[in-house]
Image (spheres, coloured by chain):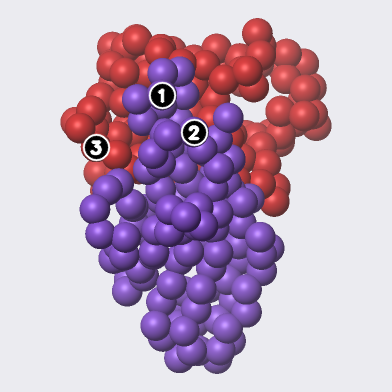
Amino acid sequence: AQSVAQPEDQVNVAEGNPLTVKCTYSVSGNPYLFWYVQYPNRGLQFLLKYITGDNLVKGSYGFEAEFNKSQTSFHLKKPSALVSDSALYFCAVRVPYSGAGSYQLTFGKGTKLSVIP
Amino acid sequence: DTGVSQDPRHKITKRGQNVTFRCDPISEHNRLYWYRQTLGQGPEFLTYFQNEAQLEKSRLLSDRFSAERPKGSFSTLEIQRTEQGDSAMYLCASSLLSGDEQFFGPGTRLTVL
């Protein structure tokens, strides 16, 4: 069975500083990896995905993530944090072509990002 | 707004009552998914449809839960004989057949008293 771990419940970062939100995964097979953001009283918004190819993927709002197969990680990064980035971030994994379960997303528990002015 | 919509946004019910939620996906999306999210947790997969066919159901989906997508467009999720443990945010998402990312609606928050 696949699983996702987000080891930090909360990350605090000063505005203008780089931010990293960590994600590790456990799957059998080649994963598709995703980051979503959730603002209060709003649905999950897609940020970026890794399917294949370049290990560094760029997404919305200046976010990027690096896929590291040997460390089974997919950390979310941004060079300069904004106060408006404060939200709940979820990492998710899907394992295509794995039969039953190949279309479902498995999410981590989420990491609350607080950007301090 | 042409995103995924869900109705109602909030539902308060008494234990033992039946509730039904509706999801309208993005119009050209063939796949539709239901997830449940409880406080402090990530969304958990419940079921998904490809057009009108329900192709996968999670073990979380007990016999009291039923989902339909009769014409391959909107979907309904019904919970019969609600229990306090059913209190959660119910999220709907949709995607293209050729797409990898799922687009989520705002959710329906269910509170069972």
**Left or right: residue A51 compared with residue A42:** left
Q: Amino acid at mark 1?
A: Ser
Judge left or right: residue A104 versus residue B65.
left
- Left or right of B76? Residue B36 is right
Q: Nearer the viewer, residue B99 or B52?
A: B99
What chain letter is assigned to the residue under label 3? B
**Along the line of sight, which residue is nearer the eye, A60 or B63?**
A60
Residue pointed to by mark 2: A28
Chain B painted colour: red
Mark 2 in CB contact with mark 1 (< 8 angstroms): yes
SS of the residue under disc 2: loop
Q: Quadrant of residue A58?
A: bottom left
Q: How many marks?
A: 3
For image coordinates 28% across by 16% down, the residue present is: B51
Label 2 sits on what residue type?
A: Ser
Which residue is rendered at x = 67% and y = 41% of the image? B38
Residue A26 as seen in the image, left or right of residue A52: right
Residue B26 in view (yes/no): no
Instruction: Inspect the image, locate mark 3, and give the three-letter code of the amino acid beneath it.
Output: Gly
Q: Which residue is mark 3?
A: B99
Percent position (x, y) of residue A85?
Answer: 47, 74
Chain ID at mark 1: A
